[in-house]
Amino acid sequence: MMQNPKKFLEVINPFAQCKKYHISLWQCPSFLFLLMSLIIIAVIVGTYFIAALKIDDPKIVSLIVLGVATVLLIINYIITKSFETITEASRMKTEFIGIVSHQLRSPLTNLRYSLEILMPIELKKASKKEIEYFKILQENTKRMGNLINDLLVVSRLETGRLPLKKEEVSLLELTKKLILNFKSFADASNVKIKLKAEKNLPKIFIDSYWLEQVIENLLDNAIRYIKGKGEVEIKIYSAPQKIYFKIQDNGVGIPKEEQKYIFQKFFRSRNIMEYQTEGVGLGLYITKKILELMGGRIDFTSRENKGSTFWFTLPLK
């Protein structure tokens, strides 16, 4: 007798397993097993009718059908178990990243606050070399904090726990604010930012915090990967049921053979690595996932040593 009816229902219900792993039906082992089983049944029935038409002896027909069924079921089981093992490993990895990142964030935050308190006091009596060490420590602490925050966002995205709150947002006003925030970074990088927007742009109902993260990632990349004097141009315009955001730069670009990996986790192109820029290759992955959660999509074009153009769309409702 089944001791736990709820657990039994989860075992026989493919949708429960998909929900557990936070993946789509077409990536879910139990659903794939069910789908392949239906295909196998269809193949077995088809094999029977074909064999029955060609062979008069019913015993031989039965043996052929039994042999085909056995081989297909074994293949189905092996493939499904392999998918299940990979999916479970991926889930455990995501949970591990989330737990470790969360545990690291608290002590790192304490360290950063301690440095902010100590620096004004200690710098008054510190030597030039000691001041330099303090600044290095502060910069590295900030970089580690940013990495941990990115890992936490990735963990939430992959486990379906990223909170989204819809509110009325002006994409134009939000972009203007972020351009102002990035002005000192752009000036230091000798980069000019231009903004062109359609008049009377409609507002969108979206989570302003996460939309801000998306634009920040794209704007930061556009400025960071321009070497020497350059320009970033942003265009915002509307279309039926959509609003478009396009950002173009004349930076280092992305090599053609590497463009298919650009939205993958931890990917950084060869030419970017040559410039030793900061980052671990999570920004565009996070950007794409957030936009998809909001009902939008992102794409790009790029030419090495010529620049890149990224654009995304968001629904108006």
Image (cartoon, rainbow, N blue to C red):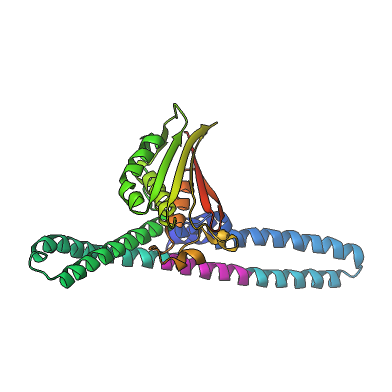
The kind of secondary structure the magenta stretch mainly shows is: helix
The residue at the point 67 percent across, 69 percent down is 73
Q: Is residue 124 left or right of residue 284?
A: left
User: Residue 225 in magenta?
Assistant: no
Q: Is residue 305 visible?
A: yes
Q: Nearer the viewer, residue 25 or 67?
A: 25
Residue ranking furthest to the front: 229
**Residue 92 falls inside the magenta stretch:** yes
Q: Position of residue 84 (x, y in %)?
A: 53, 67
> For residue 202, which quarter of the picture?
top left
Left-right relation of 72 to 167: right
Taking 170 as reference, is 84 above or below it? Answer: below
Residue drawn at x 52%, y 69% is 86
Nearer the observer, 149 or 307: 307
- Answer above or below: position of 274 versus 239: below
**From where the camera sits, is residue 268 visible?**
no
Residue lying at 45% horizontally and 27% vertically, measured from the top left: 199
x, y percent for residue 207: 38, 41
Please determine whether, in this image, residue 71 is positioned above or below residue 20.
below
* 184 left or right of 131 in image: right
What range is drawn magenta here?
Answer: 77-93
Residue 301: percent from the left, percent from the top? 56, 51
